[in-house]
Image (cartoon, rainbow, N blue to C red):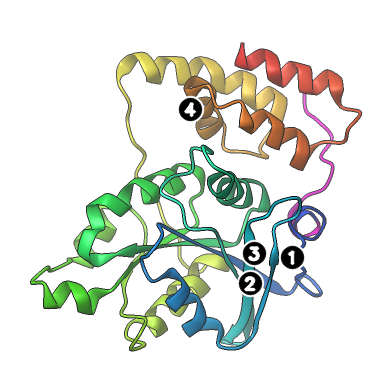
Amino acid sequence: MGLTCQSCGKALLKEKFNIRVGNNDRLVIALAGNPNVGKSTVFNALTGLKQHTGNWPGKTVSNTRGSYKYKNKKFVLVDLPGTYSLLANSVEEQVARDFICFGKPDATVVVTDATCLERNLNLVLQVMELTDHVILCVNLMDEAKRKGIFIDTKALAKALGIPVVGTSARSGEGLIELMDKIHNISIGLEKSSPKRIVYPKEIEEEIKKLIPHIKGLLGDQLNPRWVALKILEGDKTLLDSIQQFLYTENCFKHQSEVACVYE
């Protein structure tokens, strides 16, 4: 049984996230990353002084967004709170997760620190489970080079199945290539195929059992495999977010059906 979508696409960005995209001619890009990886430096380098700061609706978490033009396209860049995961254990993680999940940006850039890349990949893998439109920005390449660390971005891109760009945002190195990838992924000129984590047999079997129920309730509004993983993790905050972002207040029957999947 499908549900009635309260709002979708760019309209939801305005209603739920207070992000205006003009005449729907602007592409929305989410900028995610761990704290202290140079994410703000990337953001400032791309948007310059064209920025606006406020709070996420209903939250005390800062919301910074900016704009830029590239190849005759207009982009709105949304700087998500710095987080180590999308597990929704904090307000910042929930904001980042909900924006990627329900805001459906045209592309999500995950900024990482080249000097400690392995630690940052946890968030990258979680975003890859949520969306196909993801780009990995390996920042601080200059710092890594000084420490004798070599990052093979081509091999990393092949291993992950997504575009990988090395940058040193403070000097501007790599930013043109990053804007190229953002442009190509967001308009569908380039496709990525994120590698999925294969879980132990018992978990994969439970995922298979849940997916038909999730598809029946949510249609194609959310990635059913990702929702199944959240259910198995016992993440009940997702249920609240589904109600908040996808459905009207009078959909109590359907909300109960979704809740039953959690039981």
* Label 1 vs label 3, nearer the camera: 3
In the image, residue 101 sits, relative to residue 37, either above or below, namely: above
Residue 208 among those drawn in magenta: no
Pointer 4 residue: 229
Nearer-N-terminus badge (4/1): 1
Q: Residue furthest right?
A: 250
Q: Which of the two discs, 2 and 1, labels the residue nearer the N terminus?
A: 1
Q: Quadrant of residue 191?
A: bottom left
Left or right of 170, for residue 71: right
Q: Position of residue 255 (x, y in %)?
A: 78, 23
The type of residue carrying mark 4 is Leu
Rendered position, 28 above or below 93: below
Circles 2 and 1, Cβ within 8 Å, touching? The answer is yes
Residue 65's disc is: 2
Say which quarter of the image contains residue 212: top right
Assess whether mark 3 and mark 4 are in contact (beta carbons under 8 angstroms).
Answer: no
Label 3 environment density (alpha carbons within 10 Å; few <14, some 14–19, many ≥20)? many
At 80% from the left and 22% from the top, the residue drawn is 254
Q: Read off the magenta span.
A: 1-11
* Residue sitting nearer the eye, 26 or 56: 56
- Residue farthest to the left? 148
Q: Nearer the viewer, mark 3 or mark 2?
A: 3
Mark 3 element type: strand
Q: Give me the disc on residue 63.
A: 3
Q: Of the residues shown, which amino acid type is indicated by label 2? A: Arg
State the residue position of label 1.
Answer: 19
